[in-house]
């Protein structure tokens, strides 16, 4: 009787352990949420859009929605993963691309946006689950902003001179001359030593 109960308990344990992965595949292991590594970035600066709450290995659609101008007039979003081409041009409509949730139902996608403005990011799974929106503000550096249409003024210090300097050329020639004179004196001393040894 004890052996029979032990066998039934073992069979039940194996059945429950075998069912656990299939149960995990049907329910998200983590609560749904999304975030970005940095909510305010510069044009072309990389940030990471991450989230969780999807099924393991679920196909995702990442949406980048332009908000305020000038982002609505067109920008480029680059995805650091290999599943999408390097750059995506944002027209007035939202731009989408594909990603895949990991074994825990989470994702992390590196992005860059080239134009200043406000953007809203969401992720939608094939199951219909959605996380987001998360807002990212792309701010042009203050020193580079040109909103008046006039040429930018050079208000900073002069750039460092990385070319050849006249004194550098002069000292290089003096050094080369000293090297040649030293080599000549070595040759002369050796010839004299040979001539004296032969006499």
Image: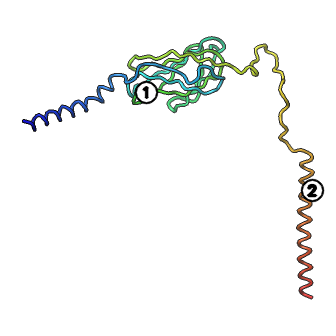
Placement of 47 over or under 194, stated as above or below: above
| Residue nearest the observer in this picture, 177 or 30 | 30
Location of residue 42 (image quadrant): top right
| Residue nearest the observer in this picture, 91 or 130 | 130
Indicate the position of residue 178 as horizontal and vertical percent values.
91, 61
> Residue 174 bears which disc, if any?
2
Query: Which corner quadrant holds the N terminus?
Result: top left
Placement of 192 over or under 89, stated as above or below: below
Mark 2 and mark 1: span between their CA atoms?
67 Å
> Residue 170 bears which disc, if any?
none
Placement of 3 over or under 46, stated as above or below: below
Indicate the position of residue 75 as horizontal and vertical percent values.
63, 20
Location of residue 3 (image quadrant): top left
- Secondary structure beneath dot 1 equals loop
Label 2 neighbourhood size at 10 Å, few (<14), some (14-19), many (20+)? Answer: few
Q: Which residue is mark 1?
A: 101
Indicate the position of residue 192 as horizontal and vertical percent values.
92, 79
Residue at 50% from the left image edge and 27% from the top image edge: 108
Residue at 23% from the left image edge and 30% from the top image edge: 16
Residue at 89% from the left image edge and 53% from the top image edge: 172
How many discs mark residues in the rendered view?
Answer: 2
Closer to the chain start, of discs 2 and 1, is 1
């Amino acid at each position: 009787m004890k052996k029979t109960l032990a066998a039934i308990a073992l069979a039940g344990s194996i059945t429950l352990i075998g069912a656990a992965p299939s149960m995990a595949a049907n329910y998200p292991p983590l609560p749904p949420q999304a975030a970005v590594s940095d909510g305010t970035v510069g044009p072309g600066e990389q940030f990471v859009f991450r989230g969780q709450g999807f099924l393991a290995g679920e196909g995702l659609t990442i949406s980048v929605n332009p908000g305020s101008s000038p982002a609505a007039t067109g920008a480029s979003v680059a995805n650091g993963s290999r599943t999408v081409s390097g750059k995506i041009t944002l027209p007035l409509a939202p731009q989408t691309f594909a990603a895949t949730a990991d074994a825990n139902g989470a994702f992390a996608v590196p992005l860059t946006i080239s134009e200043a403005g406000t953007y809203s990011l969401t992720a939608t799974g094939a199951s219909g689950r959605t996380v987001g929106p998360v807002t990212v503000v792309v701010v042009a550096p203050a020193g580079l902003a040109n909103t008046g249409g006039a040429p930018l003024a050079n208000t900073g210090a002069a750039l460092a001179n990385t070319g050849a300097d006249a004194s550098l050329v002069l000292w290089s020639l003096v050094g080369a001359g000293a090297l040649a004179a030293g080599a000549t004196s070595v040759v002369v001393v050796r010839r004299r030593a040979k001539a004296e040894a032969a006499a």
